[in-house]
Image: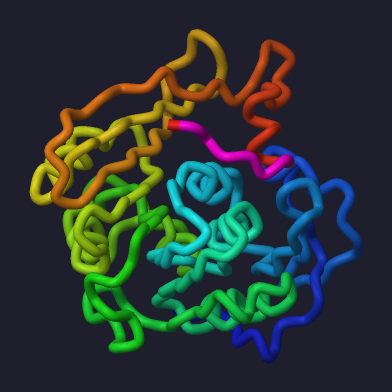
C-alpha cells in the first residue's frame, strides 16, 4: 500500500470521530497527515493517519477478548498502527508481543506508538506479508494470535479510492482461510486464535477453522438490544476437540445511543471481554 512516508508526515490535525473512540473530543490540536488520539480512557496514545483507514472500536474489542497470560507470547497479524497490540500490552502486564504489518509506513508508525507508550522492551513490529512471513517470526512459538483481517471478498466490494483504507477492508493476496492458516502456523499446539470479523462471514470463518481448530466460541457484538449483530469475535484453540459454542454476546449501545456500561468498561476501562 502506498502512502506518504512517516518521515514526511506532520504532527496531527484531526482526531478520531466520537463514534470511533469516545476519547477523541478531548484530544489536542492535530495536523493534516496524522492525528494523535487517546485509547482506553487516555491510558494510551495512538498516532495514525488522519485520512484513510483509522482504528475504531474493533481493535479494542479484539484485544479485550484475547486469553493471554503475563508469560505468553502474542502475535498481532495485520497490526496496522498497533492499536490492538497496545491495548493488550496495557491490559496484560508482562506478556511479550509481536506485530506483523504489510504496509511498511504503518509498521513504522506502529513502532513509534509502541515506543511512545513505553512498551518497546516487550513488543516488536515486523514489516512483512503473512503470505511469506519474515524469519523473525518463528513458526509454532506463539501462545496467542489475534487478527482483524480485511472483511470483504474482492467480488463483493467496491474498493475505496484511498489505498490504505481499501487494503484494510478488502482481501488482497490472502483470503480468510489463508489468514487463519497463517495463525495456525504461528501458534504452538493448543494455542489460541482470536479474530474479529463481519457476522455475515460466519460460515466462512467456521469452514476455515474446521481445519485444525476446536473449542470455537462465537461472541456476537450487538449494536443495540433487538438489532442484528454486524460483528462477531471468534476464539478457537489449535488442535482442540471441544465442541463449538455460541455466547450471549455484548450489547454495545443503550437506548440513548451511548455505549453500555459493559462496553465502556472495555473501551475506556481496559477490562477483558469475558468468554
Magenta-tinted stretch: 269-274
Tell me if 151 is positioned left or right of 243 in this view. Answer: right
Q: Is residue 86 above or below residue 258?
A: below
Residue 7 x/y as whole percent: 68, 91
Q: Is residue 35 magenta?
A: no
Q: Position of residue 47 (x, y in %)?
A: 71, 69
Residue displayed at 32% across by 30% down: 218
Task: Please give the name of the residue rendered at 70% of the width and 20% of the height, measured from the top-left corner.
Answer: 257
Q: Is residue 5 above or below residue 28?
A: below
**Is 273 colored magenta in this rendering?**
yes
Q: Could you say which is closer to the camera, residue 44 or residue 52?
A: 44
Is residue 184 or residue 39 the one in the foreground? Answer: 184
Side of 40 where 271 appears, left or right: left
Choose top left, top right, bottom left or bottom right for residue 236: top left
Task: Answer yes or no: is residue 149 visible.
Answer: yes
Q: Nearer the viewer, residue 130 or 41?
A: 41
Q: Main secondary structure of the magenta part?
A: loop
Residue visible at 81% across and 53% down in the picture: 42
Image quadrant for the N terminus?
bottom left
Amino acid at each position: 500500500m502506498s502512502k506518504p512516508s512517516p518521515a514526511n508526515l506532520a504532527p496531527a490535525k484531526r482526531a478520531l470521530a466520537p463514534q470511533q473512540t469516545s476519547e477523541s473530543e478531548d484530544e489536542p490540536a492535530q495536523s493534516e497527515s496524522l492525528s494523535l488520539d487517546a485509547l482506553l480512557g487516555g491510558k494510551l496514545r495512538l498516532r495514525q493517519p488522519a485520512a484513510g483507514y483509522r482504528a475504531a472500536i474493533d481493535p479494542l474489542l479484539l484485544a479485550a477478548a484475547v486469553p493471554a497470560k503475563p508469560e505468553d507470547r502474542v502475535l498481532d497479524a495485520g497490526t496496522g498502527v498497533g492499536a490492538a497490540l497496545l491495548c493488550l500490552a496495557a491490559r496484560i502486564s508482562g506478556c511479550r508481543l509481536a506485530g506483523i504489518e504489510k504496509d511498511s509506513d504503518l509498521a513504522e508508525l506502529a513502532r513509534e506508538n509502541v515506543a511512545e507508550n513505553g512498551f518497546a522492551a516487550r513488543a516488536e513490529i515486523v514489516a512483512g506479508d503473512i503470505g511469506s512471513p519474515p524469519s523473525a517470526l518463528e513458526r509454532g512459538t506463539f501462545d496467542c494470535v489475534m487478527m482483524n483481517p480485511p472483511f470483504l471478498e474482492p467480488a463483493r466490494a467496491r474498493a475505496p479510492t484511498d489505498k490504505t483504507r481499501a487494503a484494510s477492508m478488502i482481501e488482497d493476496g490472502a483470503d480468510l482461510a489463508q489468514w487463519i492458516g497463517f495463525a495456525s502456523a504461528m501458534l504452538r499446539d493448543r494455542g489460541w486464535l482470536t479474530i474479529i470479523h463481519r457476522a455475515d462471514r460466519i460460515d466462512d470463518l467456521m469452514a476455515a477453522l474446521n481445519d485444525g481448530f476446536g473449542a470455537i466460541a462465537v461472541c456476537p457484538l450487538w449494536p443495540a438490544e433487538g438489532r442484528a449483530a454486524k460483528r462477531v469475535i471468534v476464539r478457537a484453540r489449535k488442535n482442540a476437540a471441544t465442541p463449538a459454542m455460541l455466547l450471549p454476546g455484548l450489547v454495545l449501545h443503550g437506548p440513548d445511543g451511548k455505549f453500555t456500561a459493559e462496553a465502556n468498561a472495555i473501551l475506556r476501562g481496559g477490562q477483558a471481554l469475558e468468554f
